[in-house]
């Protein structure tokens, strides 16, 4: 294989990456976008979606329809074809109010580069930028490249909250934060242009390959940007008395939009969630409630069939006629008007799922009812709180059936993982420690990722890489050497090396671990991972 031949590497059991190189070069990005366009026009069998990055293309595929070997062969054929030139994208002009409260870092950037603020603005607006890819947040386009004399490192400490619409720079890149979020880039201005509207026909303003010019403007920026789309519950069936610690509407997840920076979200323990839906005769991926550690209190206003699966949170149905009645896991229970469902304490596991016959009928956004907590759309756009009301769909005609699925057992777990795609960026000792070491779940874990504490996994060189595509299960290792396993709300791209990727079927078990629980890894080949899809006991 020639030195410039792209590498095709497995990313767990249901994705792969085509690595054109590991440098930020326009010609590599052009090759990525050309291959992406070719796949979108003529996908190989089993391809679910593709995610372009700086110098690599992530391909998510269905392992039930194709194997890694077959997907790799299909991509090799396309790489052997004559190199194509990607289409020129759309053009956008983005008005920006620079400096002041809209761009608090403009003065610091100017001083660091030896310019006045006016000169920084002139240079920033003089360039036509290309959208190299979209990631990190829905609609966040990485725009390159900034004039060399403006190259500025990202901030030493990220801000906990960057306002939506902020125009920022880091290194040779610039971009616009579509939503309020944490961020470490230098803020030089702000725009009112909406870069992502989940309710629009074209959700993302900017697509890979588009060209962008910034225009200095004196127009004020509305502090309420961006606006959300509220919705009323029609014929509410269930009242939320208390939302618990973190209760959200989730379904089977949002597929096909990772290229726009939209994560899958959805059930983080699919086995338990789908079992709950089966118990009330719903389709397996119907929308339900995911409850974390401290469950909600719900009052029923109509006769409703429901089931609880996953973590044992001591679910009890309060009935005026019979008093408190324990809700058995895996069995459909009928609640009458006035009955109240409470969850009194966590006994085992972390996340419980409450399915209601007919499913929860919040609006479908980008093909899913799942809540995206970061961007604030889907579900209720947030965790449930007191006085929210839930509406349900039509009760299935099928009979409810008991489902045998034990609550998560306490104790250590072993997760199967496929090495890579950047395992070559770690020392031999680090790769050995991944399997020999025992890690503990950190209290800082959430739906974005499960943070682990334990043996340090040292890099051979820098602890950052050229950002590339990720899927749930990717084991990112930041410079501190402590791994983070991505979960359903994890970003679509990331800039830390990934030493391995957890097999899809094992991820739900990790999602049920609480702080302090022990986790170990066992590396398997991609062939073994695709041969045995069921999780270990």
Image (spheres, helix red, strand yellow):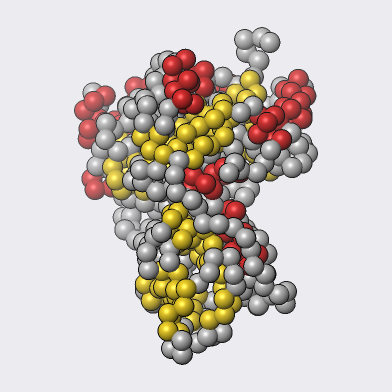
Of residues 263 and 193, the one nearer the viewer is: 263
Q: Where is residue 252 in the image (x, y as percent from the top left)?
A: 60, 56
Q: Which quadrant of the structure image shows residue 240?
A: bottom left
- Residue at image position (56%, 19%) is 21
Q: What quarter of the picture does the N terminus occupy?
A: top right
Considering every residue shown, the one lying at the far bottom of the view is 321
Q: Position of residue 446 (x, y in %)?
A: 41, 48
- Residue at image position (36%, 46%) is 515
Q: Is residue 470 visible?
A: no
Q: Position of residue 43 (x, y in %)?
A: 75, 38
Considering every residue shown, the one lying at the far top of the view is 2
Q: What quarter of the picture does the C terminus occupy?
A: top right
Of residues 363 and 212, the one nearer the viewer is: 363
- Compared to 304, does 154 lie above or below? above
Q: Position of residue 96 (x, y in %)?
A: 37, 45
**Number of disc labels:** 0
Q: Is residue 508 visible?
A: yes
Q: Is residue 259 left or right of residue 116?
A: right
- Residue at image position (41%, 69%) is 343
Of residues 404 and 287, the one nearer the viewer is: 404
Q: Which quadrant of the structure image shows residue 186?
A: top left
Of residues 176 and 247, the one nearer the viewer is: 247
- Compared to 132, does 507 lie above or below? below
- Residue at image position (70%, 42%) is 62
């Amino acid at each position: 294989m020639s030195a410039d031949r792209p590498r095709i590497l497995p990313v767990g059991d249901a994705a792969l990456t085509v690595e054109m190189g590991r440098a930020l070069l326009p010609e590599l990005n052009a090759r990525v976008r050309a291959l992406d366009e070719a796949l979108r026009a003529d996908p190989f069998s089993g391809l679910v979606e593709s995610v372009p990055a700086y110098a690599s293309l992530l391909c998510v595929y269905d392992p039930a329809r194709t194997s890694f070997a077959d997907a790799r062969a299909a991509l090799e054929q396309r790489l052997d074809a004559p190199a194509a030139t990607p289409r020129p994208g759309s053009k956008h002009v983005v008005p920006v109010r620079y400096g002041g409260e809209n761009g608090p870092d403009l003065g610091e950037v100017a001083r660091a580069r030896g310019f006045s603020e006016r000169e920084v603005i002139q240079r920033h607006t003089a360039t036509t930028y290309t959208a190299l890819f979209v990631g990190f947040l829905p609609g966040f386009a990485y725009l390159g490249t900034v004039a060399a004399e403006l190259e500025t490192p990202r901030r030493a400490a990220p801000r906990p909250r960057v306002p939506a619409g902020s125009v920022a720079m880091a290194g040779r890149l610039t971009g616009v934060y579509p939503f309020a979020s944490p961020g470490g880039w230098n803020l030089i201005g702000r725009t009112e242009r909406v870069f992502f509207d989940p309710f629009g026909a074209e959700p993302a303003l900017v697509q890979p390959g588009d060209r962008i010019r910034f225009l200095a403007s004196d127009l004020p920026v509305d502090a309420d940007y961006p606006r959300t789309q509220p919705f009323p519950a029609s014929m509410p069936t269930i009242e939320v008395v208390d939302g618990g610690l973190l209760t959200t509407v989730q379904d089977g997840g949002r597929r096909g939009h990772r290229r726009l920076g939209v994560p899958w979200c959805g059930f983080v323990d699919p086995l338990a969630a789908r079992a709950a839906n089966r118990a009330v005769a719903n389709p397996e991926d119907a929308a339900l409630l995911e409850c974390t550690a401290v469950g909600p209190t719900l009052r029923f206003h109509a006769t409703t069939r429901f089931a609880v699966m996953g973590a044992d949170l001591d679910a009890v149905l309060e009935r005026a006629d019979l008093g408190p009645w324990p809700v058995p896991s895996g069995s459909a229970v009928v609640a009458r008007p006035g009955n109240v469902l409470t969850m009194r304490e966590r006994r085992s596991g972390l996340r419980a799922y409450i399915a209601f016959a007919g499913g929860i009928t919040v609006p479908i956004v980008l093909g899913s009812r799942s809540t995206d907590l970061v961007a604030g759309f889907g579900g209720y756009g947030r965790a449930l709180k007191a006085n929210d009301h839930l509406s349900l769909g039509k009760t299935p005609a099928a009979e409810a059936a008991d489902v045998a699925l034990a609550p998560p057992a306490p104790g250590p777990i072993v997760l199967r993982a496929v090495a890579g795609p950047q395992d070559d960026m770690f020392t031999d000792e680090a790769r050995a420690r991944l399997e020999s070491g025992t890690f503990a779940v950190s209290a800082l874990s959430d739906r974005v990722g499960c943070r682990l504490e334990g043996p340090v996994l040292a890099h051979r060189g820098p602890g950052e890489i050229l950002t590339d595509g990720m899927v749930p299960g990717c084991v990112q290792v930041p410079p501190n050497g402590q791994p983070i396993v991505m979960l359903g709300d994890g970003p679509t791209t990331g800039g830390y090396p990934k030493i391995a990727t957890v097999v899809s079927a094992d991820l739900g078990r990790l999602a049920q671990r609480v702080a302090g629980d022990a986790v170990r890894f066992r590396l398997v080949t991609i062939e073994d991972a695709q041969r045995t899809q069921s999780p270990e006991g």
